[in-house]
Amino acid sequence: MSTPTAPLPVAALSALARLHAAFPVVQAVTVYETAAVHAVQLAALAQSGQMSDLDADSLAHAEELKDGARDTLAAAGRLDLIGGES
């Protein structure tokens, strides 16, 4: 029998939030990777010709999140964590 992993208990979410706040590099990697996936999904929607104005705004926001996370990682000298040069 396997142990369920989702959804996380409230206490675990709280602990995870504290960890993210304490480790900006970890947080930046998480934000970058999540925004990158979202941007790819929205770009595919744009290519299909079915992108709404809201989707376009979401794509721009995802790109802004990626840029901010990249800046944080560059300042920490850890672009290697997202496949860039350190």
Image (cartoon, rainbow, N blue to C red):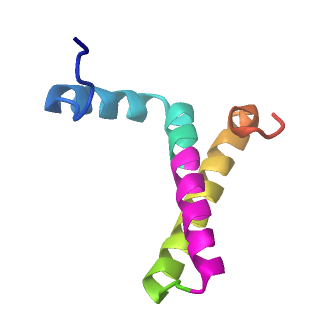
Residue that appears at 32% across and 29% down: 16
73 w.r.t. 8: above or below:
below
Which is more toward the observer, 46 or 65? 46
Tell which residue pokes out farthest to the left in this image: 10
Which is more toward the observer, 30 or 37? 37
Residue that appears at 25% across and 15% down: 2
The secondary structure that most of the magenta stretch takes on is helix
Q: Position of residue 11 (x, y in %)?
A: 17, 26
Tell me where residue 7 sits by quadrant. Answer: top left
Which segment is the magenta one? 32-49
Tell me where residue 63 sits by quadrant. Answer: bottom right
21 w.r.t. 71: above or below:
above
Q: Position of residue 40 (x, y in %)?
A: 61, 61
Screen quadrant of the C terminus: top right
Screen quadrant of the N terminus: top left
Which is more toward the observer, 70 or 1? 1
Tell which residue pokes out farthest to the right in this image: 85
59 w.r.t. 83: above or below:
below
Residue that appears at 67% across and 50% down: 71
Q: Is residue 70 left or right of residue 56?
A: right
Tell me where residue 10 sits by quadrant. Answer: top left
